[in-house]
């Protein structure tokens, strides 16, 4: 469904536009002699598009608007209402130009005011792509000048820094993936949270299809891959489909080692990680991506334990120790680490020295995993059948 405009009342009195033009002319340090007359002609002929262009092209007009105190928001509201009467197919460009003019006319100290004016314009527009473009401009402006405006979840911009809220809004507006890209990238660049940055980088990568993967897409995919390797646990659910993304797959051409390492962290075990490091010249291969060998090994042990737990319901300590290449005395420490990560739910039988798996994420689901699931379902079916048969017989005996 299309986005809805604000229901805020706007002064659309017959002479409101003319009074605004004269106010801008009086407030501007200098305007050309024919500015007011040209605007009057546009108003007389009902040419809203040309009136907007005349105001935007007049040097100092928007600066004068921004300099107004209480009247600035009302002035922008009036211009937004004027845009509603523009029949020109380039009305979206006028929205863009107005927003850019407001940004240029404000200093760093006036960032809050600039965003307030842009937010007014945002609330007055109903076209989804225009609203997305305005959000990109506001978030980019705040990132460059006043990042604190993005940090509070209660602020106008802060509420859109949460991936679920922003994605839900774009879904509601039926915005296509390619038209979300700039907004996701702006938020990824503006957030101060590493997890949030990775979330929005992943969302950005997801907007690419095979035919539009370019240099920028590869750089974004590279960033997402490194982030997924640096922390494969915290965003496990979001990152589990990363290998299927066209932009990630395109890394094979120029960034093959990085893609290979990502595959290890998505599907492999500790021994696969160690083999990769050895084959690619040792731990120095990780330095180019600013990855910590210690953290990589720690994460691979947790992920390897999860893979092992997905294959067996009861695991002897010695098997865990062998898989993780550690001492049996350290097994419980790694089980606790895996449980704390949320990827595994298990109990430890210290007398029998076994890990009892209750629930575990599945890192890889292919034909072998389907066969395993089939075997479990058949076993469950047979068990349930046995219980039902026993119940049937007991009922017959009672009769």
Image (spheres, rainbow, N blue to C red):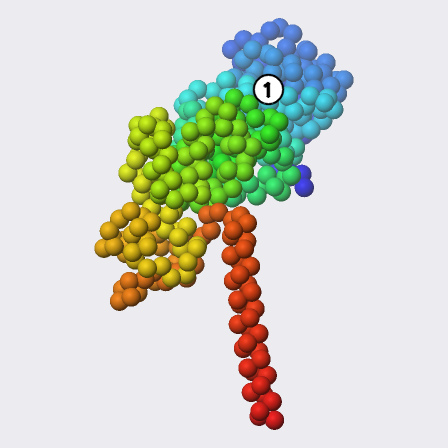
The one nearer the camera, 249 or 225, is: 249
The C terminus appears in which quarter of the rendering? bottom right
Evaluate whether residue 162 shows in this view: no
Query: Height in image: 100 above or below 221?
Result: above
Q: Where residue 325 sits in the image (x, y, percent)?
A: 29, 47
The one nearer the camera, 55 or 199, is: 199
Residue furthest toward the right? 45
The one nearer the camera, 274 or 27, is: 274
For the point 37% across and 48% down, which residue is it?
Answer: 304
Q: Where residue 146 sits in the image (x, y, percent)?
A: 40, 28
- Residue 309 lies left or right of residue 9; in this view the side is left
The one nearer the camera, 395 or 189, is: 395
Q: Where residue 216 sits in the image (x, y, percent)?
A: 51, 23
Q: Where residue 359 sits in the image (x, y, percent)?
A: 43, 59
Query: Height in image: 357 above or below 324?
Result: below
Labels in figure, total: 1
Report helix, strand or loop for mark 1.
helix
For the point 43% across and 55% down, which residue is it?
Answer: 311
Query: Height in image: 266 above or below 79?
Result: below
Evaluate whether residue 355 shows in this view: yes
Q: Name the residue beneath numbered marker 1.
A: 97
Circle 1 Cα neighbour tier, 10 Å, few/some/many (<14 / 14–19 / ≥20): some
The N terminus appears in which quarter of the rendering? top right
For the point 41% across and 50% down, which residue is it?
Answer: 307
């Amino acid at each position: 469904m299309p986005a809805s405009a604000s229901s805020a009342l706007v002064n659309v009195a017959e002479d409101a536009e003319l009074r605004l033009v004269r106010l801008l002319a009086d407030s501007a340090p200098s305007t050309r002699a024919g500015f007011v007359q040209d605007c009057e002609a546009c108003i007389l002929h009902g040419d809203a598009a040309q009136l907007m262009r005349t105001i935007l092209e007049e040097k100092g007009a928007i600066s004068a608007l921004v300099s107004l105190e209480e009247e600035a928001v009302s002035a922008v509201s009036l211009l937004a209402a004027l845009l509603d009467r523009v029949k020109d197919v380039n009305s979206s460009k006028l929205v863009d130009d107005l927003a850019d003019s407001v940004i240029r006319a404000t200093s760093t100290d006036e960032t809050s005011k600039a965003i307030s004016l842009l937010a007014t314009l945002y609330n007055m527009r109903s076209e989804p792509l225009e609203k997305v473009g305005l959000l990109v401009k506001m978030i980019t402006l705040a990132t460059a000048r006043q990042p604190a405006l993005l940090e509070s979840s209660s602020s106008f911009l802060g509420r859109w820094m949460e991936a679920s809220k922003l994605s839900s809004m774009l879904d509601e507006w039926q915005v296509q993936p390619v038209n979300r890209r700039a907004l996701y990238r702006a938020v990824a660049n503006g957030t101060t949270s590493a997890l949030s940055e990775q979330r929005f980088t992943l969302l950005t990568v997801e907007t690419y299809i095979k035919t539009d993967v370019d240099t920028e897409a590869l750089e974004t995919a590279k960033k997402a891959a490194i982030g997924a390797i640096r922390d494969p646990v915290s965003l496990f659910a979001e990152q589990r489909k990363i290998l299927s993304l066209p932009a990630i797959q395109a890394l094979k051409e120029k960034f093959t080692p990085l893609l290979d390492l990502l595959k290890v962290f998505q599907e492999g075990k500790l021994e696969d990680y160690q083999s990769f490091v050895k084959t690619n010249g040792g731990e120095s291969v990780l330095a180019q991506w600013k990855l910590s060998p210690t953290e990589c090994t720690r994460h691979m042990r947790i992920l390897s334990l999860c893979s092992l737990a997905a294959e067996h319901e009861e695991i002897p300590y010695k098997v865990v120790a062998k898989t993780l290449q550690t001492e049996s005395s350290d097994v419980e420490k790694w089980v606790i680490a895996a449980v704390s990560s949320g990827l595994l739910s298990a109990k430890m039988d210290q007398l029998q020295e076994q890990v009892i798996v209750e629930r575990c994420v599945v890192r890889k689901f292919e034909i072998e995993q389907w066969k395993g699931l089939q075997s479990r379902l058949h076993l469950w079916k047979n068990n349930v059948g046995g219980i039902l048969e026993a119940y049937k017989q007991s009922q017959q005996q009672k009769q």
